[in-house]
């Protein structure tokens, strides 16, 4: 037996409704492109606490399943295919659990012990990313959700200003260009660099991707706390700045040039460390005025003591003069050794899950 309760939340009076409203259980967060603001959630929580709940309704699970099946067949989803709450105007949720939905100015409450499948399959951050995609993944969404969840657990998500997963299942509307930290923002691909499904975007030796990330205007990266990283799928030994910004001072990353990982962060002198090839995760972390550490596939190559000078002007670009193929790019504040190692594991786990890992 499942307990399904309805509540009307009104400012001036308390009214009880016995009507039921069915939900699309897998996707409770997205509601016509929006979720409630923090202030709205706080206000709803206050009203829900102060309002007497309506009388309980007890029904068999089979009856609920039948009702939902009929309702879903008769009503289109508000958020498009695979998205949204059915026929709901807004929703109140907390910690990935939907607590109430609104329809025609009536609030319908679901008790926490209700098990109608109303917990979102995705973490909140990936739900926003998924919702921002027009051509949504149908095979690798679970792997992408795992990537975000792991990034949060391991700490490299919270200090990020830009996370780009170029290795996408689809790219019908620039899904490979989305900044996963701010899903409403996308890179620019003005010259249509080639996208390959599940692999990423490949440079043509001339054109670039514009990230829109300006070092002086971000939340986490600073002059002496910056991380840049890319995951390359191809073996290329070329003097090509896969990450590049040169205005005032420089930040650049060259995955392989004459057998070395080369680069600099917020300065004008580069450093190089020997590597096997360009494939996999290349990362540079500036942690102080005279400390910049280089990593390959999660392992430290060494530290450079070149002094920082200033933050470069303008926005980072990707694939400058490169013919490599990018599956992942990262910009943010300084990561620890462990966070770099975890990032490598998390990204490689995702790439292996989609069958395109190279480490």
Image (tube, rainbow, N blue to C red):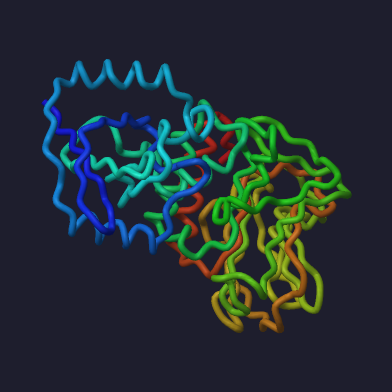
Residue 137 visible? The answer is yes
Residue 294 in view (yes/no): no
Task: Tell me the residue at 73%/35% (across/down).
Answer: 195
Seen from the viewer's position, the closer of residues 325 and 11 is 11
Q: Position of residue 269 (x, y in %)?
A: 76, 76
Residue at the image position 68 percent from the left and 50 percent from the top: 186
**212 lies above or below 15:** below
Q: Nearer the viewer, residue 273 or 266?
A: 266
Q: Quadrant of residue 247?
A: bottom right
**Residue at far front of view:** 12
- The residue nearer to you, when weighing 283 against 184, is 184
Q: Nearer the viewer, residue 22 or 116?
A: 22
Q: Residue at the right extreme?
A: 206
Q: Which residue occupies 66% across, 45% down?
A: 232
In the rendering, at what x and y percent does residue 70 appear? 35, 16
Left or right: residue 188 versus residue 82 is right
Q: Quadrant of the N terminus?
A: top left
The image position of residue 116, as x and y in percent, is 25, 30
Looking at the figure, which quarter contains the C terminus? top right
Residue 206 place in picture, x, y as percent: 88, 49
**Measuring 65% from the left and 41% from the top, which residue is drawn there?**
176
């Amino acid at each position: 037996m499942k307990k399904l309760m309805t509540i009307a939340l009104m400012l001036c009076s308390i009214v009880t409704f016995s009507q039921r409203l069915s939900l699309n259980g897998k996707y409770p967060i997205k509601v016509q492109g929006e979720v409630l603001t923090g202030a709205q959630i706080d206000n709803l929580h206050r009203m829900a606490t102060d309002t007497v709940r309506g009388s309980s309704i007890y029904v068999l699970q089979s009856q609920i399943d039948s009702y939902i099946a009929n309702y879903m067949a008769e009503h289109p989803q508000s958020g498009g295919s695979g998205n949204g709450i059915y026929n709901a105007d807004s929703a109140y949720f907390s910690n990935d659990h939907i607590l109430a939905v609104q329809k025609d100015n009536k609030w319908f409450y679901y008790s926490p012990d209700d098990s109608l499948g109303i917990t979102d399959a995705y973490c909140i951050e990936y739900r926003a990313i998924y919702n921002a995609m027009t051509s949504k993944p149908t095979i690798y969404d679970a792997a992408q959700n795992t990537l975000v969840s792991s990034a949060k657990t391991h700490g490299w998500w919270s200090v990020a200003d830009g996370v780009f997963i170029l290795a996408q299942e689809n790219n019908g509307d620039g899904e490979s260009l989305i900044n996963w930290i701010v899903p409403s923002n996308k890179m620019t691909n003005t010259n249509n660099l080639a996208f390959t499904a599940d692999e990423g975007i490949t440079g043509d030796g001339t054109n670039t991707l514009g990230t829109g990330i300006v070092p002086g205007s971000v939340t986490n990266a600073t002059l002496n706390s910056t991380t840049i990283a890319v995951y390359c799928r191809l073996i290329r030994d070329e003097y090509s700045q896969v990450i590049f910004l040169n205005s005032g001072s420089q930040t650049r990353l060259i995955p392989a040039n004459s057998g070395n990982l080369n680069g600099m962060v917020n300065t004008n002198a580069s450093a190089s460390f020997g590597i096997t090839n360009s494939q996999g995760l290349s990362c540079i972390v500036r942690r102080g005025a005279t400390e910049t550490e280089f990593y390959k596939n999660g392992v430290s190559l060494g530290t450079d003591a070149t002094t920082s000078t200033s933050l470069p002007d303008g926005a980072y670009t990707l694939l400058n003069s490169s013919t490599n193929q990018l599956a992942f790019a990262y910009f943010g504040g300084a990561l620890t050794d462990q966070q770099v190692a975890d990032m490598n594991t998390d990204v490689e786990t995702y790439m292996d899950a989609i069958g395109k890992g190279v480490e």
